Image: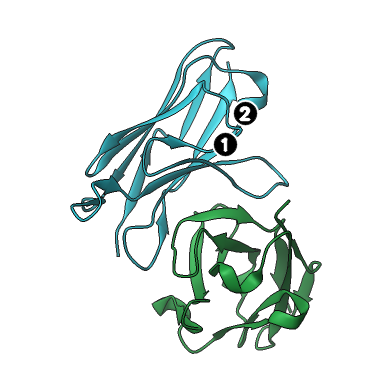
Chain colours: A green, B cyan
Amino acid sequence: QVQLVQSGAEVEKPGASVKVSCKASGYNLNGYAMHWVRQAPGQRLEWMGWINTGNSKTEFSQNLQGRVTITRDTSASTAYMELSRLRSEDTAVYYCARGTCPGCYLIDYWGQGTLVTVSS
Amino acid sequence: DIVMTQSPDSLAVSLGERATINCKSSQSLFSNSNNEDYLAWYQHKPGQPPKLLISWASTRESGVPDRFSGSGSGADFTLTISSLQAEDVAVYHCQQYYSRPITFGQGTRLEIK
């Protein structure tokens, strides 16, 4: 069955970077888009960006442009999201989430979430 | 960006009763190219990832109980739980996937009365 298993919780200082991994099993990573979504305390789910595995292009939310990177290691069936220049408002649960096709925005499976806390 | 607004923010319903959650989008999510509305509903329980319940506004995902149904078109949508069960306590999110950036509603917290 499809599973997305994310790396563990992180505590980072303001200005640092964090890299969250998402290991996919039960399907071919290259066959489906991978989105990253976060939810800060008391806030709605916020889409951060994605990798279209059909053309290998990435695209990011305007709010995070320049601070977020999404990559994948197909040999390890793992996707990564790195967020740099962390601020306190980046404290959130971060999810990887599978699109239903290489270029699809509809999400069908989610990782369990990774709590990232930004605190001095 | 398309803004998604859910109502109510929270809802308390008795077991066995109907629960109705609404979602409005700031622009139409209907595509003439495939006659579909690009609207999904997710169920989100504490400590768990969101679970896809409904896609294309009204298509129930495999394994989702038939007490869950989605309706609506254009910019107005509804999630209905016909007979509330204890395990349905969760936050429910609507999401548009009509255009980037993907956007979500603020969530509706559903509790037992």
- Residue at 57 percent across and 36 percent down: it is B62
Mark 2 to mark 1 CA distance (whole Å):
20 Å
Quarter of the image where one finds residue A73:
bottom right
In the depicted view, which residue is nearer to us: B63 or B9? Answer: B63
**Residue topped by disc 2:** B89
Which of disc 1 and disc 2 is earlier in sequence?
Answer: 1
Task: Determine if residue A85 is in view.
Answer: yes
Q: Determine whether, in the image, residue B55 is placed left or right of residue B50.
A: left
Q: Residue at x 21, y 53 (%)?
A: B27
Give the image location of residue A42, x and y in percent. 56, 52
Quadrant assignment for the N terminus of chain B: bottom left
Which chain letter goes with mark 2? B
Q: Position of residue B59 (x, y in %)?
A: 42, 37
Q: Residue at x 43, y 77 (%)?
A: A63
Question: Considering depth in this image, is A86 or A101 the residue closer to the camera?
Answer: A101
The mark tally for this picture is: 2
Task: Give the residue type that dot 2 points to.
Answer: Val
Residue B110 drawn at (x, y percent): 54, 29
Q: Horizontal and vertical percent for residue B113?
A: 58, 15
The type of residue carrying mark 1 is Ser
Q: Is residue B28 left or right of residue A78?
A: left
**What chain is tagged by disc 1?**
B
Q: Residues within 10 Å of mark 2 (few under 14, many from 20)?
A: some
- Report which residue position mark 1 lands on: B62
Q: Residue furthest right?
A: A8
Cβ atoms under marks 2 and 1 closer than 8 Å: no
Decide: is A119 above or below A65. Answer: above
What SS does tag 2 mark?
loop
Q: Quadrant of residue B57?
A: top left
Eyeballing the image, is B23 above or below B28? above
For residue A119, say whether it is visible. no
